Amino acid sequence: MTETVTRFSPEKQDPAARPPRCHCCGRDAPTAAFPSSRPGFQVLRCPECGLGRTWPPVAPGEIGAWYPESYYGRENVRFNALFEAMTRIFRRRRARVLHGRVPRGPVLDVGCGRGVMLDHLRALGYEAHGIELSETAARHARLRLGLPVETGDFLSSPHEKDRFHAVIFWHTLEHFPNPVEAVARARELLRPGGLLAVAVPDFDSFQARLFGRRWFHLDVPRHYFHFTPRALEAILSRHAFRVVRTDHFSFEQNPFGWLQSLYNCLGFPENLLYDLLKAEGARKGLAREHPLAVLATALLLPPLLAAALGMTVVEAALRRGGTFEIYAIKE
Ligand SMILES: [Zn+2]
């Protein structure tokens, strides 16, 4: 008599199944790491592989309510003029880094937002495609930039299989209720030898460990999962990807993670600095509502920024940066 062995397939698992089972290693007893600062949620950590997750997960049909208009910005302008300009510079840099690793051809940005990076990739000679959940952001990419951007679910998107030279998840994989399913789908769409590029917050970083529930990059409940390099590398190798590079320094993400988390720990209203950097529409009222906190935020900025920049260099040197970027080849 042959015994049937059921292999654990996280890509087929219902992410809300109880008790929760680790999507990376299959272990079924994640421990509570800490309660979230959002009432009703906690953050679990797998004792085996370190993968974190937000519990309970918000049902996919209800997550839209957690993305207010200000998340994308009114009229698609997300930050004030200075930070909008910086965001554009960072997007161009991302495009150039990818250009150094991917031959020209079709590329797909999953969760492409307003299409700023795709626009740069197109300028570098790529056939730039995007998919985005937010209709307003996608419309901006389509109408203003003329980019082919689909709206809707990546898992059932109309893209052709084995076609793309690169599939990019830039701070989007953690927003998937089942990221393992998304990795499997990316593999389907990539041509053999194609590059998967992923950037996510590092749940095992110094800033994550130090700040816990007040860590800026935790972003509960929008982030369903909280990755570590080890967990993500394991997920990728299980899907026959060969990891070619992991980077731990991001000037775009990591200093701000320190800075905002420091303010959060000092008792300021949560993510106040981040809200102050947003476009005027979203910022309105903050100075009136928290005048002292806004003043103190400004006064403390020079020393805290200096500390944040210093810590960013230290954590990256020790490969424990607040976010990491991973590049893997489809074998
Ligand atoms: Zn695990």
Image (cartoon, helix red, strand yellow):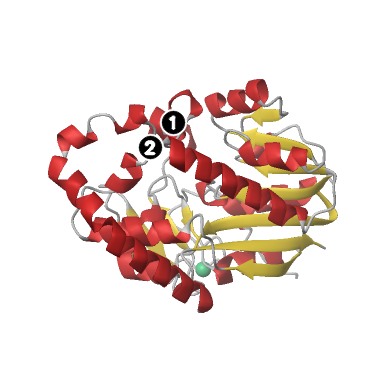
Residue closer to the observer: 283 or 52: 283
Residue closer to the observer: 193 or 83: 83
Quadrant in the picture for the N terminus: bottom right
**Residue 87 in sight in this render:** yes
Residue 327, picture quadrant: bottom right
Quadrant in the picture for the C terminus: bottom right
The percent coordinates of residue 299 (x first, y second) are 22, 54
Q: Residue at x 71, y 47 (%)?
A: 185
Q: Residue furthest bottom?
A: 318
Compared to residue 282, the image places residue 30 above or below, namely below
Residue 159, picture quadrant: top right
**Residue 30 in sight in this render:** no
Distance of mark 2 from mark 1, alpha carbons? 8 Å
Q: Residue at x 58, y 33 (%)?
A: 114
The percent coordinates of residue 182 (x first, y second) are 64, 48
Compared across the picture, whether 64 is left or right of 295 comes to right
- Disc 2 secondary structure class: loop
- Disc 1 secondary structure class: loop
Q: Residue at x 49, y 75 (%)?
A: 48
The percent coordinates of residue 270 (x first, y second) are 26, 49
Say which mark, if any, is on residue 84.
none
Q: Which residue is mark 1?
A: 73
Q: Residue at x 41, y 42 (%)?
A: 58
Dot 2 crowding, Cα within 10 Å, few <14, some 14–19, many 20+:
many
Q: Which residue is mark 2?
A: 278
Q: Are marks 2 and 1 in contact (CB under 8 Å)?
A: yes
Q: Amino acid at mark 1?
A: Gly
Q: Amino acid at mark 2?
A: Lys
The percent coordinates of residue 97 (x first, y second) are 70, 56
